[in-house]
Structures are given as structure tokens and as C-alpha cells.
Amino acid sequence: MSVLEVENIRKAYGKAPVLKGISFSLEKGEVLSVIGSSGSGKTTLLRCLNFLETPEAGCIRVNGETLLDAADPATMGQKAIREKRLHFGLVFQQFNLFPQYTVQENVTLAKKLLARERLKKSGSFEGPKGSIADLRRLPQDLLVYARQGNPDKPLMSAAEQARQDARFNSLFFGPWEAVRSSVSASEAFAIFGGQKKRSKARGWAENLLPWTQENWDKLTANAARDAYPSRFDKAITVRPTVLREAPTHKPRFGNPAEAGEGYPFDMFMYSTLPVGMPLLVVHTSADGAWVFVETGLVSGWVPTEDTAVTDAPFRSRYENGTYAVIVRDDVPLVDELGRYVTTGSLGTMLPLSGGSGSSLRLLVPVRDPQGRAVAVPVRVSSSDAVRKPIPLTARAAAEIGNRMMGQPYGWGGYLFNRDCSLAMRDLFVPFGVWLPRNSSAQAKAWQFISFVKASPSGKESIIKDEGVPFATLLWLRGHITLYIGEYKGEPVMFHNVWGVRTDDGNGEGRHIIGRAVVTSLQPGAELPNVRRENLILSRLQGMSVLRYD
């Protein structure tokens, strides 16, 4: 069977015929040269083969499959043509090359894209619906798992929870107690490198082309490293905002051609910050649009307009010792005259200033015309906010976790969605339990049990024997989950996850889940292109147990 068969291809431009019934076949390993004078139709033939032009007549077959039959409209649709282009590579004479790739990579790109398309059809790159068996067979309701034990039994004593809550408040307001910056210039500007240190790889921009040197130089200059630290102000966020590695909203993606890179993995994203987060402002960008801040969690760049400088009377009123936490996303915070102030999300902590029954009165910071913080009272329904801390029980954790169920994955809080560690952190804020920002630090926050020497079956046994449902974090490099108990004797977990690693021999891919779900320890095990060693269970390195009587 011929690799390529071309039969009676005809193409005209207006009334001028260019291809007048071209036919040929090509065997595997065979090289065919097409020779002719300028204007004889060589480029037109190639463009017809690559579906950049549409022949008026003829057939094109690859490995016996009809890719185009001009007499069959079903092969002529735009979607079908886009897919069929992947069978052909073409190097343009106008040098339309991808600058991020080598010559070889440009020439072989079609093969890679075709392999990816095949993975997509087989389920490896299926997109956001994430149709793995776990999502069909496991209830996506955390209360189902909470009710299997004693759902209302406290998972820590009242005394211990009070100690944890006091620690939470101390770390939360820590930036206001600082007497100096704790972040060195080399740490603050690591992305740009130093005099003796190379900068990190610039990565790819929003157009999926590498950051240009010109734009990178502008970004570096705007960071104003030579003036660091230029400020020392105690401030606060006045709306939900982003915390970034560099003073820009522009993204820095990894190679979009690689699995697990590109969208939505903006490597400039460190985190999102809720309204009311205490800050220590230590630096301002050259254009004044960004400030470098320290928080109780992480440090980075925040838009200036999303912050306000605090004075001692404001901090005294704000840090009043009684607090509430928003327990639902997208809660509008409205002042006592009915005017919208900002939005609260699950995990937002704000001072209490009164209220009872069906509503709570909270204080929300706003920025005045001089950039100073002013506390504004707002009313929030008691169904949307709770007094912190509430008793940590399986039922309470399940109810809060259910409000995240199905939400989209967002690396670093990208587009104000949650990644795995941000989901875990926000889940435990209402209970006054502090968790660091990233997964590796969260794994060490409680009593850590290593899986280094355990087999996959051994890991399951340890989790079932020593794990506490709704109070145990399962950790592997780059990902963290919440153990929620067993379902029909099988350990299960709640997590916000991007996808499952796949590999069918044509390179690594992803079967995308892209949201907060309940799965087994081996989500995607049934997929034909998944290797056992790539499943979560095989890669688990340990678990962290919030173990208190």
C-alpha cells in the first residue's frame, strides 16, 4: 500500500487552470521531486496536499485513508481539513518558521502534532470534561464520605484548635509586626538573575512565542532592582488580587508544545490574595504600577491600586481579635447603604464588628484618594460567612469542600481559580488551621509519614491504617490532596487536579481533568496510554496527618 496517493488533482484560479489532473503515488522511504519553471504549479500542488488550497477535483489518500475527495462534501469541512493538515509537514519558501524550534523541530512538527491529535481522540488529551472512570463510579459529594464515620466528632480538641487559631492569626498579621524586610534582593529578583547569576529561562509569552529580549529588558528595567528596597510601609489588599514573580500581568508559559506546559501554567503566578490580606510593602516598580510585598505566605509583586497603606489607628481597629471567614466564592460585599465594595471568596478572613442571627457585620478595607486604608462595615449573610474558628469535623470540612467541587483548576490561582495547594489552604482557613502556600511546604506542616520505602500496596495500607479522613494530606512532588476515607474498601481523595500523565510511545501527554474532584489513588488507571509508574499512587511520597486528640 502506498503511503501517499494523489489522483486527478485539479485546481484553477478563476478561469486559469494550474493543475490539470495531477496523479502520483509515493511509497514509504521513497523521495519524489517535482520540477518545473516558476509559475508551473509546484507550490499550488504542495498547498493542495497540505489543504492550504482546496482542489476542485481529485482525491488524496494517506495509508489507504481518504483524506480528501472533492466529490464528497464530508471531507471538505473546515474541522476535517484542520485535522488532516496534521498528516503533512511543509517548510515555506518565505521562511515562516517557528523561532522557538530548531530546523529539525520545524520539519518534524507535523508528526508531533499528529501524534497529539491521536492521543486526543484516544482520550489522553480529552479536554476539560475529564471523563475518567473514577468520576463516574465515585460519588462527587464529600458528605457521602464524611457520613461513613462519625461526621460530627471533632478532629482536634478545643484547646488545640484555639492554639492553632492563635498561630494562624499571628502568621496572618505577621507583616505588620515586621521591623525590616526579610526578602533579599537576590531573592526578590531571582527571575532576572544577578551580576554573577544567569536569569531564569524567559519562557513563552501570550502569543505562544518566546519572550523577546526587548520586552524582557523592559520588564527588568521596570523592576528597578538597583533601588531595592525603596519602601517600608505596612499595607493591606483592598480587593482580590494577584501576587506575581514579576511586575506584569503578561504571562510566562513553558514550552506550549510540551505536556503540562503552556496554558494555564503561567509561571509568573505565585498566588492570589483575598481582600484584607496584611502586607509589608518594600519596593515600587519604576512606573509605580506595582509594589513588591511580603505576606504571611509568600512574597511577590501586586498591582499598586489593589493595596492601601495603613496607619496605626487602622491596624488597631482592624486587628481586633475576632474574625470571620467567607465560606463561599463570589460573595458580594456591600456596605450599609447597599453599595458594592468588593468580592469575598472562600477563605477570605475579615474582622468582625458585630452582627448576630442571619448576618454578620464585617470590616472591609478600601483605598481612599491618597492611597490610605479606610475600614468600611459590610453585612454578610451567616450562610456566606462564619465566625473563626469553627470546630473541625468531617461534616464541616465536607460541606466547605463541596463548595469547591467541580471548580476549574488554576495554576498559582490563575484567573482566580485554585490549584491543588490553594484549595487545601482555603479549605482549612475557617477552622483556624494555617497551611503554607505550596504543596511541599504543606506536606511538612503536620505530622509527616514518609512513603519512600513503601510499595504501592504498602502505601494504601499506611493510608488506611494511619490516615485520618478529612485531616490528612497526601503528597507527591508538585501535587497535594486530601484523604477523605474509603469507598467500598478503597482509599479516596479530594483534590483540584490538572490531569493524568499519559504516554503512548509518541511522547508524554495529559488526560485533562482540570477541576476539583473526588478520585481514587489511581485516577485514569483504565486509560490505555497510562503507565502504572505515572499514576498518583506510584508517585506518592508521603502523607501529613493533623493528629490531635
Image (cartoon, helix red, strand yellow):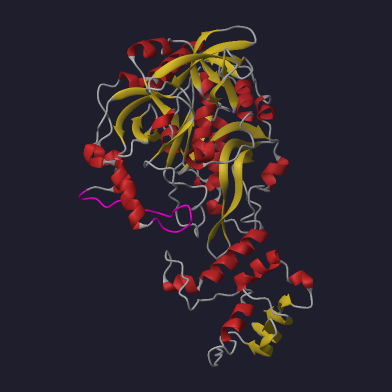
Please say whether residue 174 is one of the residues in the magenta stretch: no
Q: Position of residue 205 (x, y in %)?
A: 44, 53
Q: Position of residue 460 (x, y in %)?
A: 57, 39
Q: Is residue 223 left or right of residue 440?
A: left
Please say whether residue 202 is one of the residues in the magenta stretch: yes
- The residue closer to the viewer here, 224 or 29, is 224
Q: Residue furthest left?
A: 196
Q: What residue sits 66% from the left and 56% below the top?
A: 123
Residue range in magenta is 195-211
Q: What residue sits 55% from the left and 70% below the top?
A: 110
Q: Is residue 473 visible?
A: no
- The residue closer to the viewer here, 212 or 67, is 212
Q: Locate the N terminus and report the quarter of the image it occupies.
A: bottom right
Tell me: residue 219, above or below residue 106. above
User: Does the magenta stretch mainly form a helix, a strand or a loop?
Assistant: loop
Name which quarter of the figure residue 204 lies in: bottom left
Q: Is residue 335 left or right of residue 255?
A: right
Q: Is residue 51 visible?
A: yes
Q: What residue sits 37% from the left and 57% below the top?
A: 212
Name which quarter of the figure residue 329 lies in: top right
Q: Count all numbered tags in the image, as a single digit.
A: 0
Tell me: residue 254, above or below residue 169. below
- The residue closer to the viewer here, 496 or 35, is 35
Q: Residue furthest bottom?
A: 36
Q: Position of residue 77 (x, y in %)?
A: 72, 67
Q: What residue sits 36% from the left and 36% below the top?
A: 290
Q: Position of residue 381 (x, y in %)?
A: 62, 15
